[in-house]
Amino acid sequence: MTQPHPRKKVTIKDIARVCNVSAQTVSRVINQRPDVAPATRAAVEQAIEELGYQPSALARSLVQQRSRTLGVIIAGLRYVGVSQTLHGITAQCKESGYALMLAELSEFKGSNLLALIDELNAHHVDGIIFAAPELDDNVATMQEQLPATCPPVVFLKSRPHPRYTTIVIDNREGARTAVRHLLQSGRRRIGHITGPLKWLEARQRRDGWADELAAAGLAAEEECWVQGNWSSGSGEAGMEELLMRCPAIDGLFAANDQMALGALHYLHSRGVAVPEEIAVVGFDNLAESAFFYPSLTTLRQPLRELGSTAVQTLLAQIDGAAPPSDNLITLKPELIVRASTQRNA
């Protein structure tokens, strides 16, 4: 282990090198941030004491000041889930007396990510919510690029990370609930229209569909699922393709309500009775889903709760509260049963 020169002023980088951690981790310990493992915190504090590190008084005073502003990094506002989550964030910020600074990614992969982080840091936000959907490696890229000076960050609907709190909706279990409901209503050949599989949520819902079929001793047949893009048009096209590839299906789980609407439209145009011949379940519980024909059985996503929980969790961490032991908070979808799966409705 290399020790710094005795006459040289000890810096954060020196502490980081001695402890074999990042400068960002040392900064989190100094600023009494909760998102540091206890063993790591103890090692850093010991090194600070042994090496005689003295943080800048000016820097410490700046840390203690608050802007009462939170930053939100977001993308895909045209999608219902993203916009409803933002609504929950906005409402909770207002209730908590915080302003909101929105930083929108020009593309999901976030080639301008560092610039957005720098912009939020320049405005001295007290914390950041990463609310953009997880596609491919965009969230991992964000986590790798966070600078040492970054305030607390909470991630939404992404894969868990050991250093950051992540708040998710249980898409996999929600999909299993949808398929279980179809099975309990007597359906045995259940098709699925996925969202775009670059999206983590779409993959999780497809996995839940396959899991529940397997639990019932049924195969998740390749010809019984097709990929959509969240739009009603892709739901209509997907329903047409499914009936050609798997004409015996008697149930459908669509990965969102808009694709379910397109599927219902196609079935109605071909004279296929819903739910008598094919029962349909969506995912989202759009306000309009109760007024589809027939009204749509669906899973209600707690999207506004997701946004408000993100703000509450972030503010607690800013105040020094410890994160959950596994850095993960999970919200559950709720099944809403309507006429599209009820034969007697």
Image: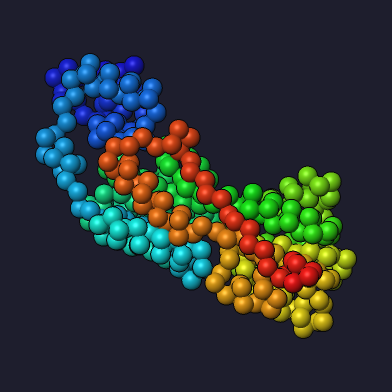
Q: Position of residue 20 (x, y in %)?
A: 37, 25
Q: Quadrant of residue 225?
A: bottom right
Identify which residue, 136 or 5, lies in the foreground.
136
Q: Could you tell whether 104 is left or right of 257 in the image?
A: left
Identify which residue, 184 or 38, lies in the foreground.
184
Q: Position of residue 316 (x, y in %)?
A: 32, 43
Identify which residue, 273 or 108, lies in the foreground.
273
Q: Quadrant of the C terminus?
A: bottom right
Q: Position of residue 64 (x, y in %)?
A: 17, 41
Identify which residue, 238 or 293, lies in the foreground.
293
- Name of the residue lying farthest toward the left: 58
Q: Is residue 79 above or below residue 1?
A: below
Q: Is residue 214 above or below residue 244?
A: above
Q: Residue at x 46, y 65 (%)?
A: 84
Q: Residue at x 33, y 37 (%)?
A: 321
Q: How is the image coloured?
A: rainbow
Q: Position of residue 13 (x, y in %)?
A: 27, 30
Residue 38 visible? The answer is: yes
Q: Could you tell whether 58 is left or right of 138 in the image?
A: left
Q: Residue at x 54, y 56 (%)?
A: 135
